[in-house]
Image (cartoon, rainbow, N blue to C red):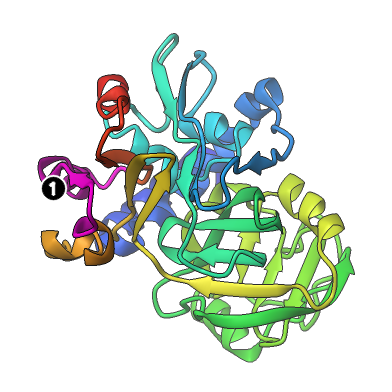
Amino acid sequence: MTMMTACLSNARRASERPASHRRWQWCARAVALLGLGMLALGAAQAKVYRLVDPSDSVIGTPFYVKARKAHTLLDVGRHHGIGVDEMQQANPLVDMWLPGEGTAVLVPDRHVLPDAPRTGIVLNLAERRMYHYRSATEIETFSIGIGREGWETPVGSYHIIEKTENPSWTPPASIRAEYAKRGKTLPAVVPPGPENPLGSHRLRLNNPSYLIHGTNKPWGVGMPVSSGCTRMFPEDIGHLFDQVSVGTPVTIVDQPYKVGWLGDQLFLEVSREEGGTPRPIEEVIPPSIAEAEGVLIDWDAVRRIQRENAGFPQLVGSRRGSRSWHHFDMIF
């Protein structure tokens, strides 16, 4: 079967599935299109974001880049550490596969920190993103792939119990049975190498069925496509592996709505599931913030941001006396 035939076959099968499964049609297209663009772009090194004020909870700065003819949104996203869903949410009017020479592409490199302890590793499933706290005010963040429907990554508090380079993979019976239904046979053990879905590094949690690992299919990072484990870009897992130790806490949350302060500016980030029911507007901004003395909320902005579901923080309020209330509204 040629690559083109495989792409058409996958796309045809995906179109017959529910919308939540149609992301699978991207696999063949990603394999066919990612290579050329990534040769030109490469992957950026991990950045450390620093909070000037420990009470702040917004990091990063969004920016635009101009696409080149050979680039897909996946290429641009991986170069800047942004996953598939994040890039598509932030650029709903840009073609995923052929943005076009000179097209302005928004890189949504701004994030509200999850409402979770600022220590170790925090995963937010809703936004497919990991936060690694080098300290309470120094943060690295990485796009991740998570469990698909029926194989969801479990929320909870865990810690790392084992670190392994060049791991072998022993597929559990459930995954071998799933492959068998598709007419494929998995070996009892997959050795290290390019065919190993764990990639080059593995972090095992104290819930031993769930891992944080690399991947031999980087197009799936940023999407809910795994069997429950957390996937990272190969360059990201290699970096993180060297930064963490056995015993590092791992907190997994699912927060589609995040609200945070940056100085006197209040930001809202929304990453709802496609087709999910919007939250009642009065519940989007917690009363502890909305009803606090001196806080001004632009409820029209809150409604718009929830409707857009763009996946990156936008300004919705300020503390009384802030002079830069409309600054980011003018940019976005």
| Left or right: 308, with 327 as reference point | left
Q: Position of residue 104 (x, y in %)?
A: 40, 16
| Numbered range of the magenta stretch | 290-310
* Residue that appears at 18% across and 46% down: 297
Residue type, label 1: Arg
* Residue that appears at 23% across and 47% down: 294
| Left or right: 317, with 137 as reference point | left
* Residue that appears at 54% across and 73% down: 252
User: Which residue is at the front of the view, 19 or 31?
Assistant: 19
User: Which residue is at the front of the view, 3 or 77?
Assistant: 77
- On whether residue 306 falls in the magenta region, the answer is yes
Which quadrant of the figure has residue 136? bottom right
For the C terminus, give its image quadrant.
top left
Q: Position of residue 46 (x, y in %)?
A: 72, 40
Extreme top residue here?
A: 102
Secondary structure of residue under mark 1: helix
Q: Is residue 17 visible?
A: no
User: According to the image, label 1 marks what residue?
Assistant: 303
Q: Position of residue 116 (x, y in %)?
A: 51, 69
Q: Residues within 10 Å of mark 1 (few under 14, many from 20)?
A: some
* Residue that appears at 57% across and 88% down: 174
- On whether residue 55 falls in the magenta region, the answer is no
Which quadrant of the figure has residue 300? top left
